[in-house]
Image (cartoon, rainbow, N blue to C red):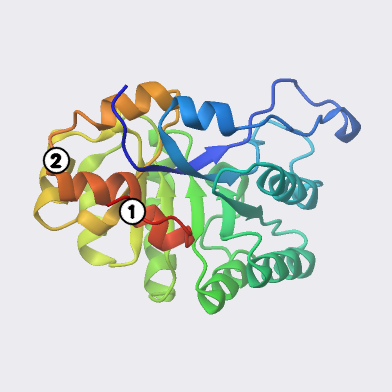
Amino acid sequence: MATATIIDALFCLPKNTKVLRIADCVPFNQDLSPLMKAGGITGAVLAPCLCGACQHQWNCADRRTQEVLNVVEKNQNPLRGLASYDPLRIGDSLRWIDESVEEGTLSGAYAQAECCVAGLDARRMYPLYGLCAKLRAPVVLDFSSRESWAHQRPQVEVVAADFPELDILLAMPPHPDVLSMIRMMQRFPRVVFLVSPPDMQAELCEYVEAQGREHVAFRAYPQSWPVATEAALTMPLSSAARHSYLFENAARLFRFPIEVPA
């Protein structure tokens, strides 16, 4: 496999079992180093597990944040982590995000759009955006489907307009609406899209090459790291644009201490 300097801007810790009780939730403790090395990945941003279908999603944001912290601390490869935000526990959430980011153990916050039942622009979400803007830490919003993106895109635009100093990273679902993405890139300079190689469609590649180089970052999901890496290296982008997509933007946003090989 060809080598490259690549950062996966969003890797959600997997959960293999359906959780009926919180006590059934087995922490992820796998060593990610072999997988990263096999896939040519020099860094990864870890997010809590995808918990949209879990009946306990409102009760364990602190557990999910601690799990990310534990994985980051146990792995030798350069990793960054994201904290969960619980809109029903605003004070606690803000405290652990603030402490973790200030200490340098986490790099930002993460929320699944489908779990924000009151909406991404709800009053209970605004303390998160305000804190991350103050800390200069990105907020990652994950969308599971095109329908979810279409429904909540206007809410994201409201948030981006209200917090122009906030870096908002949008994890796109498979087969995203590229034209809506390009329109947001043109309007909001601090909005970045996390896109897997198969979804870097021709129109998107053309725009990125011409003027949107800082608006996209590599995400392997739903492919494995080796497969996604091979696909990324064959995209119709110049070497400079490809480097921004695969490495530079994620390194800048998440403050990776990785130097580009000479």
Q: Is residue 234 above or below residue 76?
A: above
Q: Quadrant of residue 237?
A: top left
Disc 2 and disc 1: Cα gap in Å?
Answer: 19 Å
Element on which disc 2 rests: loop
The amino acid type of the residue labelled 1 equals: Val
Crowd class of label 1 (few under 14; some 14 to 19; many from 20; radius 10 Å):
few
Between 160 and 200, the one lying in front of the other is 200
Left or right of 118 in this view: 93: right
Q: Which residue is mark 1?
A: 260
Element on which disc 1 rests: loop
Q: Position of residue 232 (x, y in %)?
A: 27, 32
Left or right of 200 in this view: 225: right
Q: Position of residue 179 (x, y in %)?
A: 20, 45
Q: Position of residue 115 (x, y in %)?
A: 62, 45
Query: Mark 2 or mark 1: which is in front?
Result: 1
Crowd class of label 2 (few under 14; some 14 to 19; many from 20; radius 10 Å):
some
Residue displayed at 26% across by 58% down = 214
Of callouts 2 and 1, the N-terminal one: 2
The amino acid type of the residue labelled 2 equals: Leu
Q: Which residue is mark 2?
A: 237
Q: Position of residue 163 (x, y in %)?
A: 44, 74
Tell me, yes or no, whether the two marked residues, 2 and 1, touch with CB atoms within 8 Å.
no
Residue 25: mark in rendering:
none
Residue displayed at 32% across by 55% down = 248
